[in-house]
Image: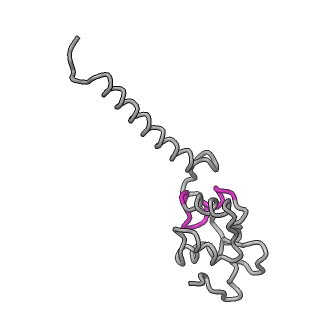
Amino acid sequence: MMDTGLSQKNILAATVISLTALAVMSSVYVSRTAHTGKIPKASHKIASAKEMVDPNTASYSSLCRLPGIGPVTAGKIMEYRNKGGRCKKIGDLADINGIGPVTIFKIRNHVKIAGENTPGNFAETGEMLVDR
């Protein structure tokens, strides 16, 4: 047999490290796709302001259809919601890391939070988008 310089301990260690890395990468992929089983394509964006989404109740795929909201941010919205966060107005979305005034401006005509009385939550009242 040819001596490659690798001991059984080194081969075992390399195998364990490889399997651990594979497990970590798999869990990251699974956690990103757990909501729907797949990551929605960006081409499935909401086309008109008539389609309204309530971030407190919307599905993962509905959140991904909002302009400026991708799979990662949609996941953050769902995580915020699952931890007990509830938006009372559109500006509350700024509490989520990755959502700022620009994103809120992009989604303002597509978001309707239950209990608010105006489309886009501020279109008629002129409410500030973000309280910061």
Quadrant the N terminus occupies = top left
Give the residue at x 43% y 34%.
Answer: 19
Instruction: Left or right? Give the position of 17 relative to 96.
Output: left
Picture layout, residue 110 above or below residue 72: below
Residue 121 point in image, percent of width and height: 70, 79
Instruction: Left or right? Give the position of 21 relative to 81.
Output: left
Give the residue at x 53% y 75%.
Answer: 100
Specify the segment rendered in magenta: 59-72
Instruction: Left or right? Give the position of 114 relative to 123.
Output: right
Residue 6 point in image, percent of width and height: 25, 24
* Front in this rendered view, residue 68 or 87: 87
Quadrant the C terminus occupies = bottom right
Is residue 103 visible to the viewer in this orientation of the structure? yes
Give the residue at x 63% y 66%.
Answer: 47
Seen as rendered, the residue at the extreme top is: 1
Seen as rendered, the residue at the extreme bottom is: 126
* Front in this rendered view, residue 51 or 16: 16
Give the residue at x 58% y 48%.
Answer: 33
* Front in this rendered view, residue 11 or 80: 11
* Front in this rendered view, residue 15 or 31: 15
Is residue 51 visible to the viewer in this orientation of the structure? no
Picture layout, residue 78 above or below residue 104: above
